[in-house]
Image (cartoon, helix red, strand yellow):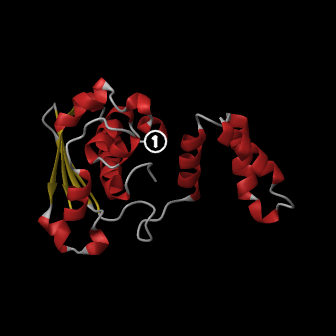
Amino acid sequence: MYPSVTSIHSALDALRHIMATERLAAADIERIEVGCGHMTYVHTAWPYRPAGVTAAQMNIFYGLAVTALHGEATAAYYAEDYLEDPAILGFIPRIAVAEDPELEAKGAAFRHACRMLVHTRGGGSFRHEVLNRRGSPENPVSAAEVEAKFRANVAACLPGRETDRVVALVAGFEALDSTEELTTILGVAWQV
């Protein structure tokens, strides 16, 4: 559900949940502590340095900083313009990631799980655990969530009217006599 490595999706969802539930903004957050399994830790918890889009997509610190600052981690925030954003780089030191032995002991089925603790500048602490990433068989997504992701992904290359038309065409895809209109709209977007 994010344009980043699957291993960090549960952490992004945990942070979004805490921020929404507790009505926190990035300025309210003193520290984020993340517990994860070994594979998530070794593949995503290396010190972030701007080194291209793929590096940002693979890094848990970058994804969490973007989420804290912008409330989401859509494709727009993985564009070259953001990779060296001083606000993102400045937020990263507030994030700590460590292997969680209990999550690791649950086995491979929980390799993307996350336990999060957010400390606020006001002295509060909030916990949330996400055992299965959204989009997995154990935590399926709704059609509305898929549509929201699509809209975020095409926002920079497809005007709203055309986006609405693609959504409508896909919703009735099985009844289409032809895919010509759909492929024409998407073909124009691809050229942008």
Q: Quadrant of residue 121?
A: top left
- The residue sitting at 21% across, 74% down in the picture is 106
- The residue sitting at 19% across, 63% down in the picture is 38
Q: Residue furthest top?
A: 86
Quadrant containing the C terminus is: top right
- The residue sitting at 25% across, 59% down in the picture is 40
Q: Residue furthest front?
A: 51
Q: Name above or below for residue 10 compared with residue 191.
A: below
Relative image position of residue 153 (x, y in whole percent): 55, 43
Helix, strand, or loop for circle 1? loop
- The residue sitting at 42% across, 32% down in the picture is 80
Is residue 4 visible from the viewing direction of this image? yes
Relative image position of residue 17 (x, y in whole percent): 34, 48
**Viewer-side residue, 157 vs 17:** 157
Q: Quadrant of residue 63?
A: top left
To which residue does mark 1 refer?
74
Disc 1 packing (10 Å; few <14; some 14–19; many ≥20)? some
Residue kind at label 1, given as amino acid type: Thr
**Viewer-side residue, 178 vs 19:** 178
User: Position of 139 compared to 45: left or right?
Assistant: right
Relative image position of residue 132 (x, y in whole percent): 35, 65
User: Position of 1 compared to 127: left or right?
Assistant: right
Q: Residue furthest right?
A: 177
Q: Name above or below for residue 99 compared with residue 183.
A: below
